[in-house]
Amino acid sequence: AQSVTQPDIHITVSEGASLELRCNYSYGATPYLFWYVQSPGQGLQLLLKYFSGDTLVQGIKGFEAEFKRSQSSFNLRKPSVHWSDAAEYFCAVGSYGGSQGNLIFGKGTKLSVKP
Amino acid sequence: DVKVTQSSRYLVKRTGEKVFLECVQDMDHENMFWYRQDPGLGLRLIYFSYDVKMKEKGDIPEGYSVSREKKERFSLILESASTNQTSMYLCASSHSRGRVANYGYTFGSGTRLTVV
């Protein structure tokens, strides 16, 4: 079955520290992948996407993610976290072979930032 | 700026009421989706639509229905609201098939529904 796993429900990091949020997927076909961010009380905003080419992709707000096919992972990273990065982060995967291209979302990782 | 607009940010309704949540997109997207979001449960797909007058059940359609009379508008209907439908409701839209890879989904700001 197709699935997306975000192993960490909640992560707390200090402001200025580096961040890595994990995402693993199980998908039979060639995937395309997204990370979204949700600030409290808001909808989801697209951070970055991968669908082909360079496996290291850059996004908005200084985030990047690396697609590793051998590990079925698409981890999100940021070298130095800012207090405004506190939010919930969702990984999503779709497939070119899937019907209509529907995305499957992980359950999210909530990020807290300590001053 | 492209948008998905949900008509209400906050709603309070009484048990048994019929509730309409409206979603409008201005991107000429083929696909539209309704999710509910609850703490610890992530996004759960209620219904989606690939075209006008078409609808497909998602993972949790019970107690809900939808309407898509025009391409840009996708309405979620709670036939008889219950307290367990208190939640954040998110609408999203996308292009179809391979173009989803290029653009992903665009989400509205959400409607926080409280049923009392």
Image: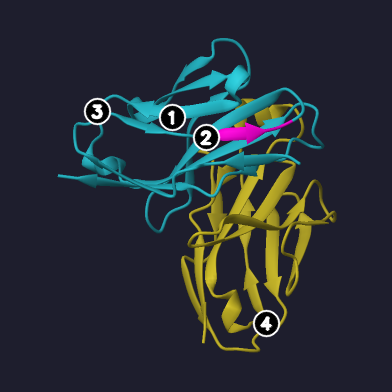
Chain colours: A cyan, B yellow
Dot 2: within a 10 Å radius of its alpha carbon, few (fewer than 14), some, or many (20 or more) residues?
Answer: many
Q: Which residues are magenta?
A: A23-27
Name the residue tied to disc 1. A76
Q: Is residue A12 above or below residue A33?
A: below
Name the residue tied to disc 4. B18
Q: Is residue B28 above or below residue B6?
A: above
Whether callout 1 and callout 2 share a subunit is answered yes
As shown in the figure, which amino acid type bears the numbered disc 1?
Answer: Leu
Residue A28 falls in image quadrant: top right
Dot 1: within a 10 Å radius of its alpha carbon, few (fewer than 14), some, or many (20 or more) residues?
Answer: many
Look at the numbered discs 1 and 2 and tell me whether their residues touch, using CB distance below 8 Å: yes
Q: Is residue B28 visible?
A: no
Dot 3: within a 10 Å radius of its alpha carbon, few (fewer than 14), some, or many (20 or more) residues?
Answer: some
As shown in the figure, which amino acid type bears the numbered disc 3?
Answer: Ser
Name the residue tied to disc 2. A23
Quote the CA–CA distance across marks 4 and 3.
48 Å
Quote the CA–CA distance across marks 1 and 3.
13 Å
Q: Going 56% across and 27% down the picture, which residue do you hit?
A: A73
Q: Going 72% across and 64% down the picture, which residue do you hit?
A: B60
Quote the CA–CA distance across marks 2 and 3.
20 Å
| Label located before the other in sequence (1 or 2) | 2
Residue A54 falls in image quadrant: top right
As shown in the figure, which amino acid type bears the numbered disc 2?
Answer: Cys
Q: What secondary structure is found at the residue carrying circle 4?
A: loop
Q: Nearer the viewer, residue A47 or B4?
A: A47
User: Disc number at residue A80?
Assistant: 3
